[in-house]
Image: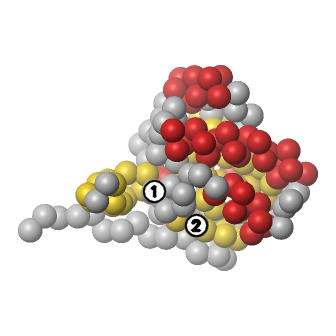
């Protein structure tokens, strides 16, 4: 009988969002607390420079202006080192904040790291997830196992942002 790690604790609306300070693509610290007073979309993705994650990051970049007008900032979190995030940003002309969580502590705190199915097998990894954090730092929305393609459009519809 094989041992599997317990499923990560999932966040729900009303929960306090786990605070974090992580380096961005330029190595500068980015803190969730710096965004108090504004809503923040925190999205967790497995790996920069992969097809699904590129689709999602490009879609968030395309929506960034409308989301900012609606009072929403965007922070993407992956376990990639800042140097890889910098290549990702430059290669795809991304204009959103990407931060590095190599030890996966923040991803785990959000319930976005743990056992998941990949091609029918159970593996440990980043669970593609998106959270909307309110201006006071509480979880407004939590979505786990989201699809890379079409997710940003669905999020815009759910938030009533044209």
Extreme-right residue of the structure: 69
Residue found farthest to the left: 1
Picture layout, residue 123 above or below residue 87: below
Q: Quadrant of residue 136?
A: bottom right
Depth order, front residue of 55/43:
55
Q: Is residue 9 visible?
A: yes
Note whether 7 is above or below 79 in the view shown: below
**Which element is circle 1 on?**
loop
Residue 76, x across and y down, in percent: 62, 45
Image coordinates for residue 27, horizontal then vertical, percent: 61, 27
Q: Residues within 10 Å of mark 2 (few under 14, many from 20)?
A: some
Quadrant of the rendered image containing residue 7: bottom left
The answer to which of 110 and 50 lies nearer the viewer is 50
Residue in the picture at 84% in, 61% down: 161
Check residue 143 in the rendering and tell me which mark sits there, or answer none.
2
Left or right, residue 2 beside residue 100: left
- Residue for point 78% across, 47% down: 63
Q: Residues within 10 Å of mark 1 (few under 14, many from 20)?
A: many
Nearer-the-camera pick, 91 or 1? 91
Indicate left or right for 17 with 34 as reference. left
Confirm or deny contact between disc 2 and disc 1 (CB under 8 A). Answer: no
Which residue is denoted by mark 1 in the rendering?
A: 127
Between marks 2 and 1, how big is the CA–CA gap?
Answer: 10 Å
Is residue 86 in view? no
Q: Looking at the image, is mark 2 or mark 1 earlier in the sequence? A: 1
Considering the numbered disc 2 on the image, is that residue within a helix, a strand or a loop? strand
Q: Residue at x 58, y 38 (%)?
A: 54
Vertical placement of 51 versus 118: above or below?
above
């Amino acid at each position: 009988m094989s041992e599997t790690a317990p499923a990560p604790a999932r966040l729900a609306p009303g929960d306090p969002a786990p605070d974090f300070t992580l380096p961005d693509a330029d190595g500068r610290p980015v803190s969730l607390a710096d965004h108090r007073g504004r809503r923040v979309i925190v999205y967790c993705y497995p790996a920069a420079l992969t097809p699904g994650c590129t689709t999602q990051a490009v879609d968030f970049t395309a929506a960034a202006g409308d989301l900012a007008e609606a009072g929403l900032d965007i922070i993407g979190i992956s376990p990639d080192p800042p140097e890889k995030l910098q290549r990702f940003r430059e290669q795809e002309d991304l204009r959103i904040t990407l931060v590095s969580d190599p030890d996966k502590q923040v991803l785990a705190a959000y319930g976005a790291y743990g056992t998941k199915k990949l091609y029918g097998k159970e593996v440990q990894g980043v669970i593609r997830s998106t959270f909307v954090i309110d201006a006071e730092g509480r979880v407004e929305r939590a979505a786990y196992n989201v699809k890379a393609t079409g997710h940003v459009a669905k999020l815009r519809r759910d938030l009533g942002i044209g």
